[in-house]
Image: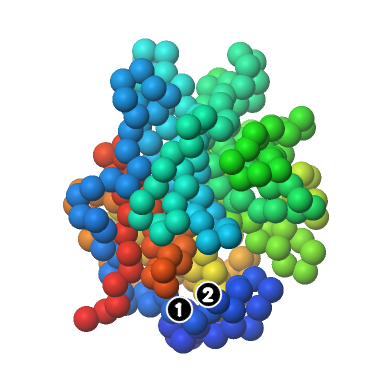
Amino acid sequence: MSAGLIILLLIIGENSMGELEPPSRVAVPLDPAGTWVETPWGEPVIDRGEAGEWDHYAVDNPYVHPEGGKFYCFFEAQDKPFSQGGHEAFGLAVSSDGRRWEKLADNPILNVGEAEAWDSVVAKLPAGVIKRNGLYHLFYSGLDKSTKQIGLATARRLTGPWTKAADNPVLESRSGQWDAFLSTYPAPVFEIEGNYYLLFRGMETRYRRQGAGLAMSTDLRHWRRFMDRPVIPVAEEMASLALTTVGGRYVGISQPTDLRGRRYWFSVDLKEWQKGPAVNFRASVQAETLSNPFLANGRWTVLYEQKDRIYRAVLQPPQ
């Protein structure tokens, strides 16, 4: 299928995979010719905490899970620079309209592991929240002294408490391979015909030769790579891929090393991807890692990192 035809399907909102896209969402097209505009202009919607708090130094890398008329933003934060003994953990903010957000009083909801744990240095990039058998599953990136890998935390409620899986990491890095370092993308976990699919970021070395990989599972705890190679090659330097579904198709917004190269990516099966047009984005500074696009009050919305704070943008139709 050509990229042009996929774009057309996204615009008209055709739905041929209803189990992935609730009818209430299909009616709102995501037009790649539109412009994402920072709203409100120049004002973070989730700000850093006060001096001495767990999120004083930075809040970033948001992922948004809509459920029950509310929006749950999982984000990572840092208390102080690493050179001063800083740590990264992640927390949760809740909104009823996608614009005004309130942090949980008992943040952070998940922290780094013990001294020799696989996630002893950072626990970050929360993403992929999905519910199975009454249990929420949340995936995240952990780092020890040598490599990054992907782990799982579970909870009965979105607000926690969250418990790390005993057999973490659930997706391990591979020394000497294209994915010697792993981390999560701001993308949901998708269930298709009884299997679960997770897109992830693989790196040959940290922040170099970065591609998009695909893993699959039948139980959300045991994962295997769908194929040995990345589904989007490392030549694209895919530092982030913010992903959603529109009309049963998949649309991603990339973040390459050079942000001027940010583009749409399209797929019908998560396995084969085609590069689309450039992303039109207007921000007061420089919009970095975007959340997964989500619908709030009938408008496509993203949250994103900018100056170590989290901002919001809304997709405006083309003029």
Q: Residue at x 42, y 72 (%)?
A: 298
Vertical comparison of 157 with 110: above or below: below
- The amino acid pointed to by label 1 is Val
Say which residue label 2 marks: 25
What residue is pinned by disc 1? 28
Relative to the observer, which residue lies in front, 196 or 215? 196
The answer to whether any part of residue 117 appears in the image is yes
Side (left or right) of 24 relative to 132? left
Which residue corresponds to the image point at 57% horizontal and 24% vertical from the top-left? 112
State if disc 2 and disc 1 touch (CB < 8 Å). Answer: yes
Label 1 crowd bin: few (<14), some (14–19), many (20+), radius 10 Å: some
Whole-percent x and y of residue 50? 31, 25
Q: Is residue 187 above or below residue 46?
A: below
Front residue (pair 248, 2): 248
Q: Which residue is painted at 77% across and 69% down in the image?
A: 193
Question: Quadrant location of residue 35?
Answer: bottom left
Q: Where residue 284 appears, x then y in whole percent?
A: 19, 52
